[in-house]
Image: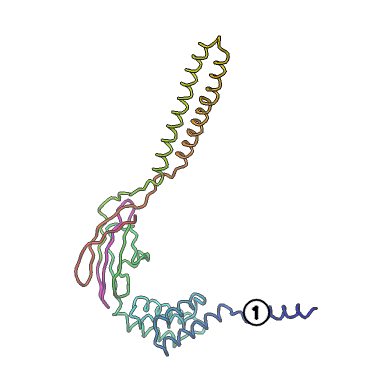
Amino acid sequence: MSIRGALLIVCALAGVASAETPQQQADKLFAEGRDLLTVKKDAKGACEKFEAAIQLDATATGTMLNLGLCYEMLGKYAKSIGWFRKAQTAAAEAQPRLGEYEEAAKQHTQAIASKVPSVKLEPSIPEAEIRIDGQRIAPTEYGKAEVDPGPHEIVGSAPGKKKVVQKVDLKEGENQTVALAFNEAAVPVYVDRGKGRRKGAIILGVAGLGAMAFSGIFSAYEKSVWNDKKDMPAEQDKIKSRVRYAGTGAFIVGAGALVAGGILYFTAPGKEQISDGTAFAPTFSNDGAGFAVSGSF
């Protein structure tokens, strides 16, 4: 084996040996997150590291617990308590059972439970779909949907009804009831992206028909003139030339325009629905109430 070939093999093996496994990457991210959380006091940065780590190792109880800790430090209590609950369940189900982690998660859950704001959702239509900040809420959570402190957008949609949008701004530990009334039928909004193309196609088709009509009339007229020139062969030849170039040419151009117009017309985009309706709804906050409008255009 040549020295060059041997070097290539050694380099390849070294590359394989140095490649980190997903578990090693998760452990590295976890360590970086702990350093940010405990040493640098950077809870936001720590949460980002732990979120990346949990994507690589979804069963890591320690990462779940630390996600709860960093979100607690950020005041995002709904996210925090969610991770503490997951950590508590994962620790209880682990073999062997992780009693220390389970107890720590339980204590933090109890400590922040009263700080978590929540919304009680009351849709007028049971089958309505409700999203808070874009995240779908399960019907089983309508009685108490936990959210972080701050402003939130609640969007409700139901078959055949206009979307209803409400905005709330919740303080720490605050609970609100939000009624979503689907009273108005949806009025779909359409956009006709092919309208201009179809209009142009019609104009082109009409021009084509006009050219073909001109060809027919011109040819008929020249034929009558040709009949009157029976004793004048030279003149008849001129008439034939005019019909060949002008009449036939106009017919070909007209037929082409008619075909092109038809293709443009039937391949033009049809009407497209861009909104299923817009609805006004009250907006609630700690400073007062107002109205919000929803709709995508």
**x then y, percent, for residue 176:** 25, 70
176 in magenta: yes
Q: In front: 78, or 270?
A: 270
Q: Residue at the spot x=23%, y=65% of the render?
A: 283
Q: In front: 249, or 175?
A: 249
Q: Residues within 10 Å of mark 1 (few under 14, many from 20)?
A: few
Q: Residue at the spot x=33%, y=62% of the render?
A: 130
Q: Is residue 147 above or below residue 272?
A: below
16 with respect to 103 (left or right): right
Residue at the far bottom: name it: 39
Q: Quadrant of residue 45?
A: bottom left
253 in magenta: no
Q: Residue at the spot x=24%, y=67% of the render?
A: 177
Query: How many labels were placed on the picture?
Result: 1
Residue carrying label 1:
15
Q: Quadrant of the C terminus?
A: bottom left
Magenta residues (range): 158-177
Q: Residue at the spot x=29%, y=58% of the render?
A: 294
Q: Regarding mark 1 in the picture, which secondary structure is present there?
A: helix
Q: In front: 14, or 242?
A: 242
Q: In front: 31, or 224?
A: 224
Residue at the far left: name it: 288
**x then y, percent, for residue 282:** 22, 62
Q: Quadrant of residue 50?
A: bottom left
68 with respect to 240 (left or right): left
Residue at the far right: name it: 1
Q: Quadrant of the N terminus?
A: bottom right
**x then y, percent, for residue 6:** 75, 80
**x then y, percent, for residue 39:** 42, 90
Q: Is residue 295 above or below residue 42?
A: above
What is the three-letter code of the residue carrying label 1?
Gly
Q: Quadrant of residue 8?
A: bottom right
